Image: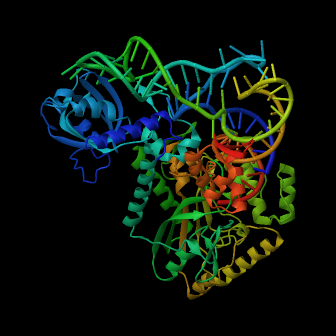
Amino acid sequence: MDNFELSEQEIIRRESLKKLRELNIDPYPAAEYKINTTSREIKEKFNPEENNFQDVYLAGRMMNRRIMGKASFAELQDHEGRIQIYVNRDEICPGDDKTMYNEVFKKLLDRGDIIGVEGFVFITQMGEITVHVKNFTVLNKSLRPLPSVKEKDGKTYDAFTDPEQRYRQRYVDLIVNPQVKDVFVKRTQIINTMRQMFNEYGYIEVETPILQPIPGGAAARPFMTHHNTLNIPLYLRVANELYLKRLIVGGFEGVYEFAKDFRNEGMDRTHNPEFTVMEIYVAYKDYKWMMCFTEEICERVALALHGTTKVKLGEHVIDYKTPFPRVTMAEAIQKHTGYNILGKDEEQLREICKKLGIEIDPSMGKGKIIDEIFGEKCEHHYIQPTFITDYPVEMSPLTKRHRDNPELTERFELMVNGKELANAYSELNDPIDQRERFDEQLKLSEKGDDEAMFIDQDFLRALEYGMPPTSGMGMGIDRLTMFMTNSPSIQDVLFFPQMKPEKKKVELTEDEKIVLELLKTLSPVNLEQLKGKTGLSNKKWDKAIKGLTKQKLATVGKTAEGLFVEMV
RNA sequence: CGGCUUGUAGCUCAGUUGGCAGAGCAGCUGACUCUUAAUCAGCGGGUCCAGGGUUCGAAUCCCUGCAAGCCGACCA
């Protein structure tokens, strides 16, 4: 491997790697390294009076070294935190050979290397719990320097902050920014808390297709792909709703899925093309029951993470104490605009929009207009958890009509911090009504609404066999994690947020490499002679040499004896 | 898709009117047996995002492109 484009520090690390091998130390050993404790366990349980932890094995990444001649301190970072280690030359190397300390530990190891240590725990004069190392084992030689983040009294210096690098190289972010790991641990706690609750209720976790022939269950542009053997188009799911309902038809009475969904739409602080939604369907329940269930989820998650229902989010403190207020959409609009939308027809609603200064386009139906009014004038007011209920029928094609008012549906959205967190219905189970609603969607799409829903005939067939009255709910897990961890961007709660590919460096083509290899030994050389040696066709030769000269790796010069090629 | 901002050493950032490319940390060499942003002495390290242009001279000014962040549009 050429050291051609490596930085100085990378070259030094590669040389250290070589020297380790020369000392018969395998920098990438295969054997298991048995540990018997962790950094956190030692810090929590070490007691000098008990004299415990006197023979510990632990492993981790060496993050910082303070070498003071014949003794050194370093920090070992494992998955639970960091602990200081103390390395003394004459204890690591009891005999005359001090190589393991002077050479290996002091010179050949670097910040970022992974080592295992054996020793005993003690407390330094400065009062820090420390592992006194008797033996160490190289477990991995790191070839790239880590960003050097330092910290004192809770203040961080020279933090690794460039968002592009943090997201592209999340592994580095996770190594040097401990608070990043916390967010993801909490994300898992959220999911575990929910899963545990659903299982307590006796509901069953299921998996449904991600590749779907018809992308149903939500109004959104799908990603399209193609199955070669079947020779059919397939879509990445935008929702899993219709499949979960088929399972309710099949006789399951409570099913849920933590689902990755995919939507081929814009990206911003709250949207990533792939994202996670939890959807749950419970037979014989209605949306009122589901509100209680939903607020229980929120309260339990908040308590599990923070030990309190009050969670800081930006400038606000959100209180997830149940019960949450319930406000109908009409009440919300009445309150924030002064207009009563109940019983109004499309023309009257357009008139209201005009007076409110809300732009709407002609393709919008009644439902979309109402949604627009709510979105513009009401949504952002609901900071504390609030259920907005009873949406107009036009914008809820999968929802049962309201028991008291056929213009409305039995639907709620849970608003937190002015954003939708969950969406739920009393599910429509009248197959004839459902077919008509799909037909309505078709008309909308013909009118120009490019996100109206597709019609799934098999789903209608399932409904015709009969689905019990059911309530279903979907909750955005990424958004919930943002709320619960006070993260302003979805990128902070996804390990690998979507990014544009990095521009790849200009690489040499195969033909250019051939020419360059020959040039290395022959340069300068007669052009015709070099061309002959490459065995390339006229066209290929021409392209290769032009490429090399353009990249300033070679030059062509003219002398009395003809054309000569020279390496730069 | 539009507006604003940013891109310089491994990391965080300076860089004046266009005039030899800078600092701290990290790294290297040396000293140091309880340090902890270790300390002390010395040293090295650059495709100034890429490509054009203006100029005697460009990190700096102009144009085009790439990538990122924020705001907006679209979108749940």
Q: Is residue A427 shown above or below A320?
A: below
Taking the image as drawn, is residue A303 in sight? no
A164 or A309, which lies in front? A164
In the rendered structure, the answer to whether residue A123 lies left or right of residue A393 reads left
The image shows residue A24 at horizontal and vertical percentages of: 25, 44
Quarter of the C terminus of chain A within the rendering: top right
In the rendered structure, the answer to whether residue A176 lies left or right of residue A421 reads left
Q: Is residue A127 shown above or below A487?
A: above
Q: Quadrant of residue A405?
A: bottom right
Q: Is residue A212 shown above or below A17?
A: below
Q: Quadrant of residue A361?
A: bottom right
The image shows residue A462 at horizontal and vertical percentages of: 57, 84
Applied colour scheme = rainbow
A483 or A432, which lies in front? A483
In the rendered structure, the answer to whether residue A561 lies left or right of residue B53 reads left
A273 or A93, which lies in front? A93
Q: Is residue A312 shown above or below A482?
A: above
In the rendered structure, the answer to whether residue A383 lies left or right of residue A282 reads right
Taking the image as drawn, is residue A562 in sight? yes
The image shows residue A108 at horizontal and vertical percentages of: 33, 35
Residue drawn at x 56%, y 85% is A466
The image shows residue A152 at horizontal and vertical percentages of: 41, 24
Q: Residue furthest front?
A: A561
